[in-house]
Amino acid sequence: MLSTVRSFSIFLIFSLFFFTSPTSGSESDHKYQAGDPVTLWVNKVGPYNNPQEIYNYYSLPFCHSSGNAAHKWGGLGEVLGGNQLIDSQIDIKFKKNVDKNTICELELDATKVKRLKDAIDNSYWFEFFMDDLPLWGFVGELHPHRSPDNKHVLYTNKNIFVKYNGDHIIHVNLTQDSPKPLEEGSVLGMTYSVKWISTDISFARRFDVYLDHPFFEHQIHWFSVFNSFMMVIFLTGLVSMILIRTLRKDYAKYAREDDDLEALERDVNEESGWKLVHGDVFRTPQNLVLLTAVVGAGAQLATLALLVIILAIIGMLYIGRGAIVTTSIVCYALTSFISGYVSGGMYSRYGGKKWVKSMILTASLIPFLCFGIGFILNTIAIFYRSLAAIPFGTMVVIFVIWAFISFPLVLLGTVVGKNWSGAPNNPCRVKTIPRPIPEKKWYLTPFVVSLLGGLLPFGSIFIEMYFVFTSFWNYKVYYVYGFMLLVFVILIIVTICVTIVGTYFLLNAENYHWQWTSFFCAASTAVYVFLYSLYYYYLKTKMSGFFQTSFYFGYTLMFCLGLGILCGAVGYLGSNLFVRRIYRNIKCD
């Protein structure tokens, strides 16, 4: 089994290297000699306010050279991001200026005029790449004060400015001019110019210009991290003070000498709260298979998030197109052992017998949730003929990674967890007859405890959610993964503290169904994140249309489900350690 997994891991890494290798020899090392051809790749076009509504650049009637233009195929992340690079076949040579050269003569008929006017009405923008550096521009401009026939103008000249240092391209920029009205029957000459400018900026710093330092390193960002850190100190101190002092009093009753029988009998008769449910607290929870699956999957997601953040800090993954997505897919496959180990061990400790069912659900829970949402979004993208549609070949590659890497590792982890950590080790014996749960006040019910449990964890990541959402939906490159690492650690600590407090309140209310409650107490953080996404959509963006709305809430739902499972697993595991710790020191029989 191990040799098979290792072989497929090597195959996967080789395949990803093959998929991401560029097609041009000069672009592979980013070094050029004077006069070497430099490829300008056209990528995509779409409404500026709808980031996911993207189409092939030549879906609009732009100049399209005759013959088969070369395509540049990237890795999984680039394809999933909707990138489709096509050689523009515009003649550009390293360090060779071009004053003005003709691309083509664009003959406008009624259909082309209508499509271009619709694009301008919707603020269509386009994206090019040169030496893996992006260039952006708008298709045209709208002049509302002009007559209806002349208010739409198309930019007909593109000025490309390229900064270089030695044999490296450092920065590219695009400006447009020569706006011409869109009139049926007219012929527009589409032209371009290229100007090369020397610079002393080093090759290692060439991506700095795309990073919005004032936005991400604003004082409010630092303040939010500091505020969350203070919340951690407060919560951990509060939990330690309340729980340790309270539990110490309870333990003192059981630590008395045997000769104080009268006092001990009186204390036992006055017992209440969490001590009374010691015979039921380790009872097998309902839907054990599902609980072990979500806890195992959540433990894997927590490991995955931590690993990807660290790799992003070390390797600056934000530089490569789709590098974050590709890294996440590979790391998810290779960390699948963790989900199987946690799920298998937990299921075995509770005495579960259908471990194959548990293993299959653990291995397929996250992939099939993503597949279900992705299938709906992909159907919409195919209907709109958008580049956001995932090609069938990419689906096959992802399925192969899951079937031959992820699934075998989950199986291996389940077997190891079942045999190494699956022995029952409950501090207290479970009674045969379940104890009735008394009626309590409304604020001590599992639903209220679960709902309120997510408030503080959400408060600790609230500001960071704004930066993450703005980066993903507003064309900003997220690069402050150090902030994200701090916020992630804070989220884990706050989630554990809050869930322990919620579990303690529940047990004091003599309700021993703490397993699912602890999970939902932590997972409810995702509910507040989704509510925040509603606020962000309506007040912070200008998105519109069925396509973009579907993708916005589809991606957000996918993210919130993952966040909820992650937090829920962390909350359960923290509460499980807490419950075993407090019942270990009392006389259960």
Image (spheres, grey):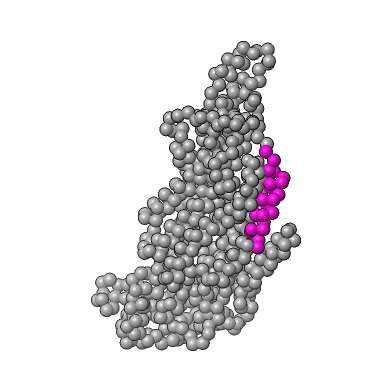
* Quadrant in which the C terminus is drawn: top right
> Which picture quadrant has residue 323?
bottom right
| Residue sticking out furthest to the right | 3
Instruction: Please name whichever residue, 533 or 196, is drawn nearer the observer in this view of the structure.
Output: 533
Instruction: Specify whether residue 564 is in view.
Output: yes
Instruction: Check the image and report above or below for 330 versus 18.
Output: above
In percent of the image, x 62 and y 16: which residue is there?
264
| Residue sticking out furthest to the front | 433
Q: Position of residue 208 (x, y in %)?
A: 55, 63
Q: Is 82 inside the magenta-drawn segment?
A: no
Instruction: Specify whether residue 307 is in view.
Output: no
In percent of the image, x 59 and y 65: which residue is there?
398
In percent of the image, x 24 and y 76: which residue is there?
147
* Quadrant in which the N terminus is drawn: bottom right
Total labels drawn: 0
Q: Position of residue 524 (x, y in %)?
A: 48, 44
User: Which range of residues does the magenta coloring cover?
Assistant: 404-424
Q: Position of residue 337 (x, y in %)?
A: 66, 53
Q: Position of residue 477 (x, y in %)?
A: 51, 61
Classified by dominant secondary structure, the portion drawn in magenta counts as helix
Q: Is 420 inside the magenta-drawn segment?
A: yes
Instruction: Check the image and report above or below for 180 versus 496.
Output: below
Instruction: Please name whichever residue, 507 or 459, is drawn nearer the observer in this view of the structure.
Output: 507
Instruction: Please name whichever residue, 103 or 430, is drawn nearer the observer in this view of the structure.
Output: 430
In percent of the image, x 51 and y 45: which residue is there?
523
> Which picture quadrant has residue 19?
bottom right
